[in-house]
Image (cartoon, grey):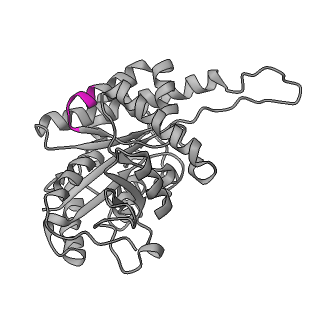
Amino acid sequence: MASVCFYFQVHQPSRLRHYTIFDTASDYFDDVRNAEICRKVASKCYLPANELLLKLIERYEGRFKIAFSCTGVLLEQLRQYAPDALSSFQRLAETGCVEFLAETYHHSLSYLFSPTEFADQVQAHRQLMQELFGQRPRVFRNTELIYNNALAEAVERIGGFDAILSEGADHVLGYRSPNYVYRPPSTPHLKLLMKNYRLSDDIAFRFSNRSWSQWPLNARKFAGWIPCLRKTFTTSPSTWLLFIPVYSILVSYCPNGICGSGAARRRCSGRRLARPKTAAHTTSKSKTAVEIIFGIRAFSINQHIQFQRQLSTHLPNSS
């Protein structure tokens, strides 16, 4: 049976206020708007989604595992404006079934400009994960999954990581599959996990699209696609990994299911979005989008890395 790793990217930027040449104060951020948006997203997205995930973990008695990649800026805002949402992430951490990944503190492109700043942000983010969730992340995710082999070397120099995540881009992989675990050159201790963007986008973007040929998508149908990929790409079921980041979920209730923001929202049928009456109503309607674990082992990312260490098979090099 395939090992499936879901990770949820969670980020809210600190928005800047309108600042003109006539302003002399040093308060560059729009605290009022940041507070308003943070509380709104927390009530419509983070709280109901985390409640559902907690129920799934309890229902499947720890066999359902997920990962979160939460930026430092988001957690600062939750601590200040929506402490109940932060508590919901902490309750998930206490289950032992939720892994928190490391990334740049400010969701920044610091690696492209300053290796020193990059290392400082990674260390600051790792300390925040330890402080808030009692975890020291073992898997690193760079902003927007930007990756090259030099980045892998920089992450290994920082130390303490078992794996790094990357985009499973077709033009880079060529004939290779994103469903394998790779090893970057010159990093003997670091594994490279790649996003399966097709199956990820089926959940994040196409789920609510009524014009999609596979609509409606439910857990049974999604799980049925997994063995087909395995027949194509794997030599042994035990070495096969399907990595699926899920970006926008439970952002708003839609008559078609879940309709995220931006591109995902535009892919909806165009019908007017209905405001959910209760969080419980949102959860029940959205259940099929998250509960895509029918017949699939849902692993945490680090759990999969530990599992790979027990295998005698050689992991292919990324070059």
Left or right position of 221 against 24: left
Task: Based on the picture, tell me whether residue 93 belongs to the magenta stretch.
Answer: yes
Number of numbered discs present? 0
Q: Is residue 255 visible?
A: no
Q: Is residue 115 above or below residue 98?
A: below
Residue 222 occupies quadrant: bottom left
Q: In this view, which residue lies farthest toward the bottom?
A: 175
Task: Based on the picture, tell me whether residue 106 belongs to the magenta stretch.
Answer: no
Q: In the rendering, at what x and y percent does residue 272 appear?
A: 49, 44
Q: In the rendering, at what x and y percent does residue 176 appear?
A: 35, 76
Q: Which residues are magenta?
A: 91-97
Left or right position of 14 against 146: right
Q: Is residue 294 above or below residue 253?
A: below
Q: In the rendering, at what x and y percent does residue 45 appear?
A: 41, 34
Q: Is residue 253 visible?
A: yes
Q: Nearer the viewer, residue 112 or 212?
A: 112
Left or right position of 176 against 60: right
Residue 201 occupies quadrant: bottom left
Q: Nearer the viewer, residue 198 or 108?
A: 108
Left or right position of 71 against 131: right
Which image quadrant: the C terminus? bottom left
The residue drawn where x is 51% and y is 43% is: 119
The residue drawn where x is 46% and y is 21% is: 79
Q: In the rendering, at what x and y percent does residue 34 appear?
A: 59, 27
Q: In this view, which residue lies farthest toward the right?
A: 22
Q: Nearer the viewer, residue 289 or 81?
A: 81
The residue drawn where x is 14% and y is 71% is: 236
The residue drawn where x is 35% and y is 68% is: 213
Which image quadrant: the N terminus? bottom left
